[in-house]
């Protein structure tokens, strides 16, 4: 499901999955599955040598001030955005990687 154009609430998605798989799915179940997918993707990237330094945007967005609109003159505050993102996911802020405690909670082995 595309999260950029949400057509259904989390509750409706849980109901849809419950109907589809004939077992009960809660919103928390969906969030846990999403967290496990994100962690597994990050573990794959770690294995392939991708690090926090690779979590970036095109140079233009980081250096060229926005020419118009309500954020005119602004550039993307990448460091702060990455820190917020990592914190939200429960990842280590300095490395951008999921800590062992999170992997254990989600039942993921390295």
Image: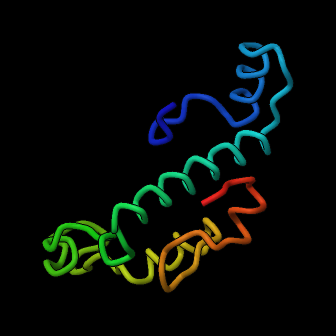
Q: Nearer the viewer, residue 47 or 21?
A: 47
29 w.r.t. 16: above or below: below
In x, y percent, where is residue 10? Answer: 70, 37
Name which residue lies at 47% across and 34% down. Answer: 2
The quarter of the picture where residue 12 lies is: top right
In x, y percent, where is residue 9? Answer: 67, 34
In x, y percent, where is residue 72? Answer: 23, 75
Q: Nearer the viewer, residue 4 or 105?
A: 105
Name which residue lies at 65% across and 70% down. Answer: 90
Q: Left or right? Give the position of 65 relative to 55.
A: left
Q: Left or right? Give the position of 54 relative to 101.
A: left
Name which residue lies at 57% across and 57% down. Answer: 39
Q: Left or right? Give the position of 52 relative to 83.
A: left
In x, y percent, where is residue 4? Answer: 45, 42
Q: Left or right? Give the position of 10 relative to 51.
A: right
The quarter of the picture where residue 103 lies is: bottom right
């Amino acid at each position: 499901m595309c999260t950029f154009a949400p057509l259904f609430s989390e509750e409706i998605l849980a109901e849809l999955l419950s109907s589809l798989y004939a077992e009960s799915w809660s919103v928390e179940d969906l969030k846990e599955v999403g967290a496990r997918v994100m962690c597994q993707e990050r573990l794959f990237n770690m294995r392939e040598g991708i690090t926090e330094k690779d979590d970036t945007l095109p140079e233009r967005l980081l250096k060229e001030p926005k020419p118009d609109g309500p954020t005119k003159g602004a550039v993307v505050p990448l460091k702060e955005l990455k820190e917020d993102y990592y914190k939200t996911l429960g990842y280590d802020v300095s490395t951008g990687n999921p800590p062992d405690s999170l992997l254990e909670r989600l039942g993921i082995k390295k």
